[in-house]
Amino acid sequence: MTKEYRRIVQGRKNANAEDAINGGWIAAGFLFFDLTNMFMEDWRDFNAEMIPKFLEANPDKTKVAAGLACGMLHTICKGTKIGDIVMVPDGHGNYHFGEVTGPYFYDPSYELPHKRPVKWLDVVVPKTELSETLQRSLGSIGTVCNVTKYADELERLIGKTSEPRI
């Protein structure tokens, strides 16, 4: 299985980034009940079951918004694998990198209760050090975006590989 790389925003406007970094996890909201053993392999099956629950709790939202929220929740809690690399913007122009180290767990004491443990790397990269194309990809709306196609650049930035020599 290939390692994937994802940008995951922690709360509205990165408001929960510091908590995530200090706490050793990434988190998501969207649904506010325990989803342990509820994640199917295919996100479509998860969405089919969860969209009605999301809409019941959020009657002002559209079915499209519900589908996006449930899909992002599945991606973070099930689709992101142990060993995948996550990058979290801190709201101050920097990205923090970590490796997912464990499975989903539910923490009802926190405002974003759906969590994954993360070992944060000792790497903080200013957005300005990222390639222009990666910066554009990271600007996508939504809580999570897959940036695996930039794996080589990301591995160099986090110090796992060196610049190619000519």
Image (tube, rainbow, N blue to C red):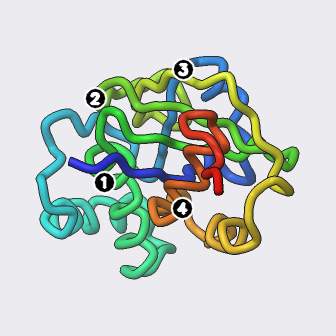
- Marks 1 and 2 sit apart, C-alpha to C-alpha, by 12 Å
Q: Residue at x 66, y 18 (%)?
A: 22
Find disc 2 in the rendering and name its residue: 103
Find disc 3 in the rendering and name its residue: 24
Instruction: Point out the tag, 4 or 3, that comes first from the N-terminus.
Output: 3
Mark 4 near mark 2, Cβ–Cβ under 8 Å?
A: no
In the displayed structure image, the side of residue 22 where residue 99 appears, left or right = left
Q: Residue furthest top?
A: 23
Instruction: Point out the tag, 1 or 2, that comes first from the N-terminus.
Output: 1
Dot 4 alpha-carbon crowd within 10 angstroms: few under 14, some 14 to 19, many 20 or more: some
Find disc 4 in the rendering and name its residue: 150
Mark 4 near mark 1, Cβ–Cβ under 8 Å?
A: no
- Select label 4 or label 3 by which is in front: 4
- Marks 4 and 1 sit apart, C-alpha to C-alpha, by 22 Å
Q: Name the secondary structure under disc 3.
A: loop
Dot 3 alpha-carbon crowd within 10 angstroms: few under 14, some 14 to 19, many 20 or more: some
Image coords of residue 13 (percent x, y): 74, 53
Image coords of residue 131 (percent x, y): 74, 65
Q: Name the secondary structure under disc 1.
A: helix
